Amino acid sequence: MSLNPETLTLLTGGIKATVLHMNAKDLVHQFVLADVLYSMIGHEANSHNAFFQTTQFNKIIEALSDQKIDAYFLLAGWENYQPKIIGGSIDFPTVITEWSGNTFKHYPAFYGEDICLLSTALRRLVLECPKGNSLPQNVGLCEFFIGEKIRRWRSNLYGDAPMGISAYGYVGEYSSHSVTMIKVMKKFGSTLGSTQDGTVLEMSDLKTAFNDNGMLTVTMKSFISDQGDVLPNIFVTCWSDEKEKQQIMASYTHGISSFSCNPVVRVQITSNGNLPDRVLLQKCLASLLAAGQQEIQVRQWGTRKEKKITTRPDALQTLMPKKKIEDLNTGETKTFIPQIGTSGQTGLFKQTTPIMRIHAIKEPEIVSTLITMGASIRMLGAHQMLPAVLNFNNIPKHVLTINSFEKVASS
């Protein structure tokens, strides 16, 4: 199967473009595209007034080589001009958890760590624009970039769908000053969190949050692929009351910060809408996060000794969709389900773990409780970060249509 398309897409206005996936195991990709990626991360950090830890950039390349994260590049150019890379992104596989009537469902998705269009490259395109041509107006280059990635992830045509399964959605962060990106996300039909109902939080020390009375019993579930392998970078913890009327789920994804180049854990907390009182809710959240931290330590995320969990599977759970796009909401895969209760307290905080970045979109009570437990509001430079979730089923049909495009051979 081809890693990348063999054709460019002719957009309205006369510019040709395509999206390339970086293969960090290929020396040509590694040495040529790595420099471009380095420049893009620096450009994006400057736009947020954030610091780029340049001396640690090799960690980004290692993560790409280990297939923990993915890098994509937008290639564009006019007829009779050599196409150039004008933008790129860093993404990694995750899950989107939703409450569906009487159970939680987990869908394969991608998390957008970074996306950037280089202003210098865009200015060069404008200068090189032949007479009679123009940059596309109906489908902007950023929309084209995102749309092409979504097509790849849903079709798995090039083998880069998350966990090999047709993607259900896309998750990311944004700040209110990113006016252009907000416009693009709204065009695709994204759900945007606000400071009132779902700001992104960070937590690195659970000792403050942990209740001295001990943990509640929670369940940890590890996903298993179609090949029977444990997915090493994703798991969930869940809690419910005895009658299962109150349920809360937390998913954990091993990722990386493109600016600091350090490992991070992306956490999504979702409830069934029926929350316990504030005292019990705090204990539930502390128990879920403490169990998650314990599992992170078992897997040794963020170290060179990362390993897969060795617990034996003992249950089946409806979790991920089938590979066919039309069956996005169905499917079945195995999970590991060990119980973690008060007996699991010993050794919970033996070592440090990567910082947790917590999304709880449309869960204002959970967000406010986490803040009282010591979670801090995630800031990027001077800007507060907010969550964005895109369910691909909610994308307006005209946004992803290719009827206005003409496929042409690569030059």
Image (tube, helix red, strand yellow):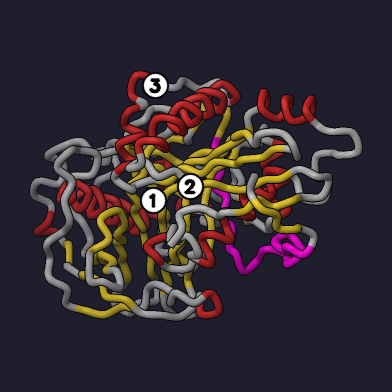
Residue 189 visible, this angle = yes
Is residue 373 one of those drawn in magenta? no
Specify the amino acid type for callout 1.
Val
Q: Are marks 3 and 2 in contact (CB under 8 Å)?
A: no
| Residue sitting at x 62%, y 69% | 393
Q: Position of residue 331 (x, y in %)?
A: 41, 80
Q: Nearer the viewer, residue 386 or 121?
A: 121
x then y, percent, for residue 317: 31, 78
Is the residue marked by circle 1 packed among few (<14), some (14-19), or many (20+) residues within 10 Å? Answer: many
Which segment is the magenta one? 385-403
Q: CA gap, disc 3 to disc 2?
A: 24 Å
Of the two numbered discs 3 and 1 in the rendering, the one whose residue sits closer to the viewer: 3
Neighbour tally class for label 2: few under 14, some 14-19, many 20 plus, Cα within 10 Å: many
Which residue was labeled with disc 1? 267
Which image quarter is the C terminus in?
top right
In front: mark 3 or mark 2?
2
Confirm whether residue 218 shows in the render.
no
Q: Nearer the viewer, residue 283 or 206?
A: 206
**Marks 3,1: beta carbons within 8 A:** no
Q: Amino acid at mark 3?
A: Gln
In the rendering, which numbered label is found on residue 53?
3
The local secondary structure at tag 3 comes to: loop
Give, as a three-letter code, the residue at label 2. His
Residue at the disc numbered 2: 21
Residue drawn where x is 36% and y is 58% of the image: 250
Residue that protrudes farthest toward the right in the picture: 132
